[in-house]
Amino acid sequence: MSHAPVDESNPPVVEADDDDGPRLEFTTRSVLSLVAFLIVALAALYFLLPKLAGLKNTWHRIEDGSPYWMLLALVFVVGMFGGYVAMFRGVFLRAGAGKIDWRASYEITMAGLAASRIFAAGGAGGLVLQAWALRRSGMPRRRVADTTLSFLILTYFPYVVALIVCGVGLWSGVFPGDAPFTLTAVPAILSVIALGIGLTIALVPTDLQRRLDGWGRRNGRFGRLAAKLANAPASASAGMRDAIDHVRSGDPALLGAFAFWGFQILVLWAAFRAFGEAPPWAVLIQAFFVGMLGNLLPMPGGVGGVEGGMIGAFAAFDVDSGLAVVAVLVFRAFTFWLPLIPGVVAYFQLRKTVEGWRYTIQSEVRDSAKGASSVHGS
């Protein structure tokens, strides 16, 4: 998708409302509160949950797990985050974020993933931090919004496709494994509907707000409100069109999305293999993605929703409950809890990187002003 031309003679100026940093802060108090919360959450998930489920030997099973498969799961975790970082860099570099190199991509994505786990459900905390960093790199606000939406669409495209393929495949009997209607056909149908809505949104003109400005001025307060609200579907359309353009052009960055989800599934598969036999691949993938919907629940820090959803999904697919509990808890320990440490470190590294960008942009503005003064003076 083509973007509006940018006047390169005027370096981008970071607006004042971005100067104080993101609205999310890792203060000493928040870190201590987080540590206390994590201790309680870990105790509930890894000690209380198995007892409530009648699985008193859960910890014994974990102790007997294969170190080989555990190590392989850790390797898959590295691949998971590597794919996410590569996709982020590819999408935003293409959008004109010249300062987003590999280091910045790592810092933004890891800090954002940590923020999404700590501050809000559904990834909202990570989006706030990501938008702040991109704005500070010099990207225009509208470009940040459109490209972020495109990035999210591309990230979750494999998610939707997997629910359709595995759901229909299991329900129709093409893939081996149990096929409860509510966890196979229903998610597949909802995914098709979501995909259709997304493609329909792309038909909305990206300049809808501008088109409605004149009409809004002629129709009083209601008209002005309607014109203002038109920005949301217009921005969604721009993001969807950009995502479609990435797919059509065969952008290599898309491989990062498949790596991000694919390596997560491999971590879960390795966790199952560490303690027993893994379910059939289609069952493993479908239960994984259905369980991931637990991220949308308003749980503090996102804890409990995915674990409960995934374990429940495996139970519905008639997977051994004890094995599912152990495998899911290990999976979440590797993909959710462990990355919090490098994520918090990346946040503080990102603050330094952003400060460097700020200094560079201010220097460019001063040099540009001096050059303009010299021209006028001569």
Image (cartoon, rainbow, N blue to C red):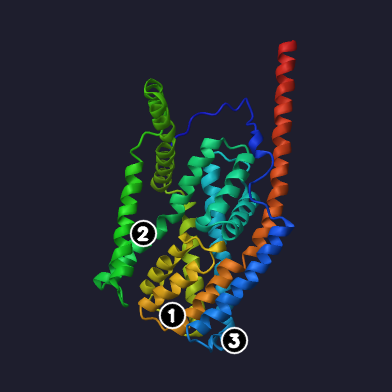
Q: Which is nearer the N-term, disc 3 or disc 1? A: 3
Q: Which is nearer the N-term, disc 2 or disc 3? A: 3
Task: Residue 278: give its label.
Answer: 1
Q: Which residue is mark 2?
A: 161
Q: Quadrant of residue 19?
A: top right
Task: Residue 78: give its label.
Answer: none
Front position among marks 2 and 3: 3
The answer to whether any part of residue 53 appears in the image is: yes
Q: Which is nearer the N-term, disc 1 or disc 2? A: 2
What residue sits 57% from the left and 78% below the top? 46
Q: CA distance from mark 1 to mark 2?
A: 22 Å
Task: Residue 63: give its label.
Answer: 3
* Amino acid type of the residue that numbered disc 1 sits on in the rendered structure: Ala
Task: Say above or below: 275 vs 260.
Answer: below
What residue sits 51% from the left and 69% below the top? 304
From the top left corner, tell me how far across and down residue 96 is, in percent: 55, 38
Image quadrant in which the C terminus is located? top right
The answer to whether any part of residue 277 appears in the image is: no
Q: Secondary structure at mark 2?
A: helix
